[in-house]
Image: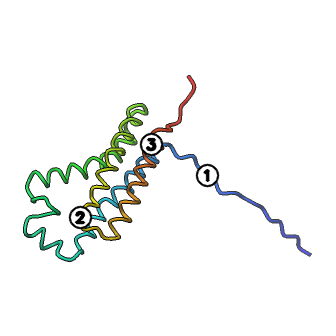
Amino acid sequence: MESHKTTQSTLEDIKVNVKLKLAALWAGFMFLYIYVDYFALYMPHKIEGILKGKVFVFDITQGFLLTALVSVSIPALMIFLSVALPAKVNRRVNGIIAALYIPYTLFNLTGLTWMHMVFGAGVEVTLLCLIIRYAWKWPRVEI
């Protein structure tokens, strides 16, 4: 009679550095940020408005497009800055930028709002709150 030996193992749980967590949260935020706007293009009459030079109540001008690009560039840069900045600056910058993007994200729910926009904003705000939380609770070392 053969005896079957069973060995138990547990999954290795690697501790992830807070900088990598922040970068991953910003990356997730960026995907949603872009895709919510992209899917909005499928809403009826959206393209017609763009072709007439309007987005919501705003005229499409060079200034509007520059502002839109800056608003996308900041979180995109935060992916890198979350990894590159020293801890003290990183903590502040992540907390401040994430806090500023919460009302900006909620502003995008002004006007005609579809469920994909509400869902996207809810997840985006959750990610921004997690960024603030991780930045606020940045691990400290005794010196």
Residue 105 is drawn in which quadrant? bottom left
Q: Which residue is mark 3?
A: 19
Which residue is at a point 46% across and 48% down the rendered structure image?
21
Q: Which mark is residue 13?
A: 1
Left or right relative to 95: residue 46: left
Q: Secondary structure at mark 3?
A: helix
- The quadrant the N terminus occupies is bottom right
Residue 59 is drawn in which quadrant? bottom left
Residue 33 is drawn in which quadrant? bottom left
Residue nearer the viewer, 82 or 9: 82
Single out the mark in the foreground, 2 or 3: 2
Which residue is at a point 30% across and 65% down the rendered structure image?
36
Q: Which residue is mark 2?
A: 111
Which residue is at a point 43% across and 49% down the rendered structure image?
129
At which x and y percent is residue 19? 45, 42
Q: Spatial distance from mark 2 to mark 3, Cα to Cα?
A: 36 Å
Q: Secondary structure at mark 1?
A: loop
At which x and y percent is residue 13? 61, 52
